[in-house]
Amino acid sequence: MDLLIAQITTDLRSSDALRQSLALLQALQQCAAGRDVSALARTAATEILSAPSSAVCKRLALDLLRALPLPPDLLDPLLLSSLRSDLSFPDPDVASSSIASFPSLPSHLLPSLLSSAHAEIANALSSPAESLRLGAVTSLSSFLPRDDLVLMCSTNPSLMAHATTWWARLAELALDSADAVSAGAFEALARLFQELEGRRMSRLAGDKLVDGEGVLAVRAQWAADAIDFIWSRRNMLIARSVVMPAESFRLTVHPLVHAAKMVASGVVNTLQRIAKPGDTTIADSVESSAEKLVGVSDIVSHLLPFLSSLDPPLVFEVGINMLALADVPGGKPEWASAAIIAILTLWDRQEFSSMRETIVRAVVTNLHLLDLGMQVSLFKRLLQMVRNLRAESDRMHALACICRTALCVDLFAKESVRRGQKPVPGTDVISLFEDVRLKEDLNSVTSKNLFREELVASLVESCFQLSLPLPELKNSGTESRVIGALAYGTGYGALNWTEPALDVVEVCRPCVLWDCDGRTYAVDCYLKLFGRLCHIYDTRGGVKTIKAGASQDQILNEMRLRNLQLQLIRDLREVHTPRISSRLIWAISEHFDLEGLDPLLADDPEDPLNIIISNMHKILFNIDSSATTSNRIQDVQAVLICAQRLGARNTRAGQLLTKELEEFRASTSADSVTKHQSRYVLQVIKYVTNHPNNRWVAVGDATGDYPFSHHKLTVQFSEASAAQDRKLEVLVHKAIQELWRPHPSQLTLLQTKGISALHKELPKACTLTGSSDPCYIEAYHLADPTDGRITLHLKGGHSCWPLWSTVLYGWFLSDCSPPRKSCFPGSCPK
């Protein structure tokens, strides 16, 4: 290799142009083969670029320098002056190669080079030679949007003026007569808009550059100028894009659509204010809304024929951008329908099979743009499509979108009926999820499909998000036509979310019978929602009557909940996992109407209370469960707490449970801790039985809380199923939060709260300790003010430390915001 490099170096130092060109070609071949020929960089720079040479040799030398890592000692003023002088070379191909070398130069050399060569760059952009114009457009579009150059422009007014002039010229070159130049200019504008929207950070030589207000102002000014130009010349640009080759047409779609969207939504005025903060002369566009609507319609009419193209990437690009236009003020559902239908046709195209995740994400993200009938018709097909996706976040985000839209459709349809409109069939949650294959999957006990667990968890988490008040959206520019997500906050009161939630708990009822290899997250989500609904409707008091002031809807909902409780009690016999049985017993017994039971059926095995207590007996005396299938300590602790709360409410329940607990204390199934706890529970039941009018709140009233979620009991068990539960929990929460409470972009934060909003407060750690004999507890929790989350870390001082204390401890701490050091079990002020 050394001999070859020496031979090439000798040829480069000769004065023969033929030998030099052959040597450069040989060096390029070695470089393309992956061999290190960086030793030739200085010789090529000094013997070819800095000396009079032929056009062919100069082009080959520039190509070689772009392919090699340039050593610092080579970047001397002689090389930079050679690059600048080559911009005026008579051969336009040499000048094009010279300007194409600019993006490979280090950042600190660019300002001086660009400032000194601005006249040559302007001449290159206006050159009659197509190759030189194309080279200039390609090079400028490569380094002008870069973060390092934008940062320099924010502190260098002269460079900023030159760059603004170049961007204006790039926009004009979109109308160039040469197809390649025009396509390059369209691509440059698209990259400018994407850099402003996506906020992607460049990583140049390993450095992470952080944007500031000045950088954002520079990008905003360039984008606003480009948007104004595209909007004012949109008819000419549309005509220019039509006559371009088919393979280049796709590059013209995004700039046209983005400019139309920014103008129609008014964001361009915000960009102008960001570009020139404090300038009171900037006013909102005086262009009429009718003019904006006509302009957007013209662009849609221009794109519509290309939805039936034979090129899948073009169909997808046009479809995605038409969906963006359907979301602006004045957008029409017909535009979204045509785009989504075209995108769905790509599902079975062989050449687009690797992009199925992208297809599903595009469709489900824009479901809210469709009319009600088409949304309903798409649900069943989308669920089958989502089932075929990968099990990670792509599938979870798609499920979150589908579940949210299904709940919003249900709410919107019910609200329309209340206002006197004709009901739309098939809009309730039960109808949306009545697919035969899906019902078989939900009712199967032994199915190993993780998809159904994700579906239940996403539905339930969406119900909880639906129960929260609407966030105040400022300058979002999105979801302007969400038919349901914004409709549920108006009209019928605060409890209208409970009606689709009731449908959800009825549809997902078979999940309590599943064998999920130890995973419980889906069941936990389900029972948590079930308990919340029972608490809201106060099912402990039985079904209300009209005389008591209940409405017809409330009576119907309470009857549905009562029937669901009876079905779940019957399902207890088919639940074979003690862990699920204990959780289901807790959720049912906490809210069941014991006083409404028929006293004549007290000895009937089918009596609900007898079924509950018989299943509690199975858990207490179950000694065959292995650690991999059941956490017996937790199951027994949960049943004992449940026995305390159940026995304190009803006399017959107290008598039956007293017998069970005394038998349990005398058996070998109980260890020392559970015997002690059983004695305590028996004392509580005896006291409440003897003093029926002296019940205290902590025992007698339901809280609607569900103590088995992973947020409350962070230290539960160490099996693999627990890790899978945590993973599923993270995926669900990430998808739901991204959908219902999306993180605002930096642009939105700067518009609403200023630059200080980008700084987040660090979490604070508070250490808590408490002791008792023979057990003690050490705990600390991390309160994160950014997302309002409290993370608990608990450690018991004894292997048999009663887990029910952990439950209560989690309850007390979960309500403390901010957390207090005095929050010990039994002493929390809340």
Image (cartoon, rainbow, N blue to C red):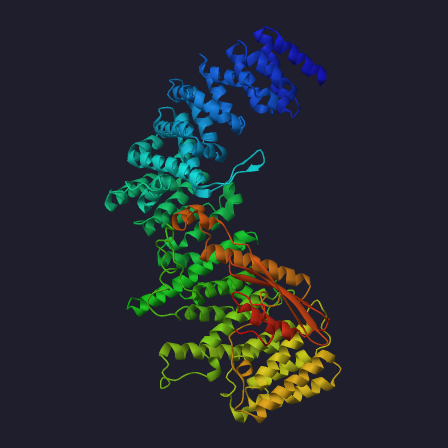
Say if residue 443 shows up in the picture.
no
The front one of 609 and 125 is: 125
Residue 32 drawn at (x, y percent): 61, 24
Residue 82 drawn at (x, y percent): 51, 15
- Above or below residue 118? Residue 688 is below
- Above or below residue 812? Residue 366 is above
Residue at 70% x, 82% y is 676
Q: Among all residues in the image, which is located at the extreme right?
A: 668
Determine which quarter of the picture holds residue 237: top left
The front one of 519 and 346 is: 519
The front one of 582 and 796 is: 796
Determine which quarter of the picture holds residue 797: bottom right
Residue 246 drawn at (x, y percent): 41, 32
**Image position of 820 (left or right of 420):** right
- Above or below residue 719? Residue 705 is below
Residue at 45% x, 24% y is 114
- Above or below residue 62? Residue 302 is below
Q: Among all residues in the image, which is located at the extreme top?
A: 15
Residue 328 drawn at (x, y percent): 34, 48
Count of all numbered marks drawn on residues in the image: 0
The front one of 767 and 69 is: 767
In the picture, the quarter occupied by the N terminus is: top right
Say if residue 46 shows up in the picture.
yes
Residue at 53% x, 14% y is 58
**Image position of 93 (left or right of 773):** left
